[in-house]
Image (spheres, helix red, strand yellow):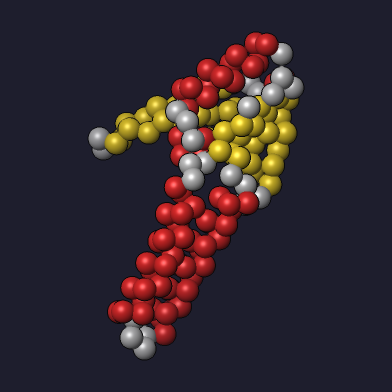
Amino acid sequence: MQWRIKPVLPVSKLIGAVAVGVLAVAFAGIDPVRWILTGVLVAALLLWALRDLLRPVRLAADAEGVTVVTGFLGRRRLGWDQIERVRVDRRTHRGLRSEFLELDAGDAIYLFSANDLGDLPEDVAAALADLRVAS
């Protein structure tokens, strides 16, 4: 089983990079600081979108364990015996509710949002529990 980011995310980031560039052309004038900030922001958005395009699968699971994306393009394989806990972390702050799938591997905790998984964290946690029991 694999869970990947929603396709709209890299597209939104690329549109954001274009929008920042257009706004800079319209409003930055000859101020070099604004152009530098624009360049940094556009580069960051492009790199962020590139990561989504190169590693769209954030979490993969099978009978032996899970593979998670780490860092910019890295991956880490975890056996089921290395995973201490799988749970859904729900929080409400200032009226906003957030849910994350949390994989506790002892030395590291991996958090995945619904945008990372392309599915609700609760559904992914249930699928992982089924896989873990079957192994």
Question: Quick check: 111 left or right of 106?
Answer: left
Which quadrant is home to the N terminus? top right
Residue 20 visible, this orientation: yes
The quarter of the picture where residue 63 lies is top right
Q: Position of residue 124 (x, y in %)?
A: 52, 24
Given residues 65 and 53, the one toward you in this image is: 53
Residue 112 visible, this orientation: no
Q: Position of residue 10 (x, y in %)?
A: 49, 52
Q: How many marks?
A: 0
Query: Relative to 6, does residue 88 appear above or below in the rendering?
Result: above
Question: Quick check: 43 left or right of 64?
Answer: left
Given residues 109 and 52, the one toward you in this image is: 52
Query: Relative to 48, does residue 99 appear above or below in the rendering?
Result: above
Question: Quick check: 75 left or right of 21?
Answer: right
Query: Which residue appears at 46% of the width and 22% of the height?
Result: 122
Query: Which residue appears at 42% of the width and 67% of the height?
Result: 18
Q: Quick one: which residue is furthest to the bottom in this view?
A: 30
Query: Relative to 113, does residue 87 appear above or below in the rendering?
Result: above
Q: Quick one: which residue is furthest to the top in this view?
A: 133
The quarter of the picture where residue 58 lies is top right
Query: Which residue appears at 64% of the width and 36% of the height?
Result: 68
Which quadrant is home to the C terminus? top right
Query: Relative to 41, does residue 112 appear above or below in the rendering?
Result: above
Query: Which residue appears at 41% of the width and 61% of the height?
Result: 15
